[in-house]
Image (cartoon, rainbow, N blue to C red):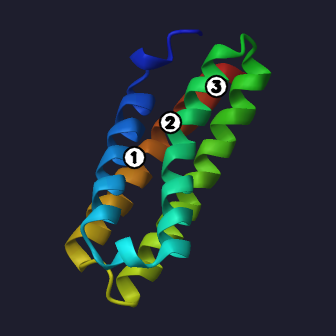
Amino acid sequence: MGNFQNLYAWQKSKNLAVEVYKLCQHTKLSKDFGLRDQIQRSVVSVPSNIAEGDELGSDKQSVKHFLIAKGSLAELITQIIISNEIGYIDNSKKENIINECKTISVMLSRLIKARTS
């Protein structure tokens, strides 16, 4: 605990947040303030909760924050699907983001299992 930057789940989720922020600047999402802001809140919540959970010093608190991060990933997937269906992002970008979300979610599940064993 306490070294969140070394957690692969944090690294991948931070990189995803950077990618999604760039996507929001350079697509039709840039003009849809409500959806764009919700997507950005969801994506930045993931590495933030991983970091906070890892720094809190107890497994119980870590697990709580890792679960919140998993919830934020589900929110992000939903928002990305909606963005695709209304024509803001293409299928390829949608699939790439969803696959990253699923990978990070599996990593978080493993961290949760390790912290509850």
In the rendered image of this protein, does residue 53 appear above or below residue 3?
below
Q: CA distance from mark 1 to mark 2?
A: 8 Å
Tell me which label, 1 or 2, sits earlier in the chain: 1
Residue depicted at x 64% and y 25%: 52
Q: Is residue 5 left or right of residue 19?
A: right
- Asked if marks 1 and 2 touch (Cβ < 8 Å), the reply is yes
Q: Nearer the viewer, residue 84 or 108?
A: 84
Q: Amino acid at mark 2?
A: Pro
- The picture places residue 100, in percent across and down from the top left corner, at 35, 51
Q: Is residue 18 left or right of residue 104?
A: left
Residue depicted at x 50% and y 36%: 47
Q: Quadrant of the N terminus?
A: top right
Q: Which residue is mark 2?
A: 47
Q: Is residue 63 left or right of residue 51?
A: right
Q: Amino acid at mark 1?
A: Ala
Q: Which residue is mark 1?
A: 17
Q: CA distance from mark 2 to mark 3?
A: 9 Å
Mark 3 Cα shell of 10 Å, populated few (<14), some (14-19), many (≥20): some
Q: Which residue is mark 3?
A: 52
Q: Secondary structure at mark 2?
A: helix
Q: Secondary structure at mark 1?
A: helix
Tell me which label, 1 or 3, sits earlier in the chain: 1
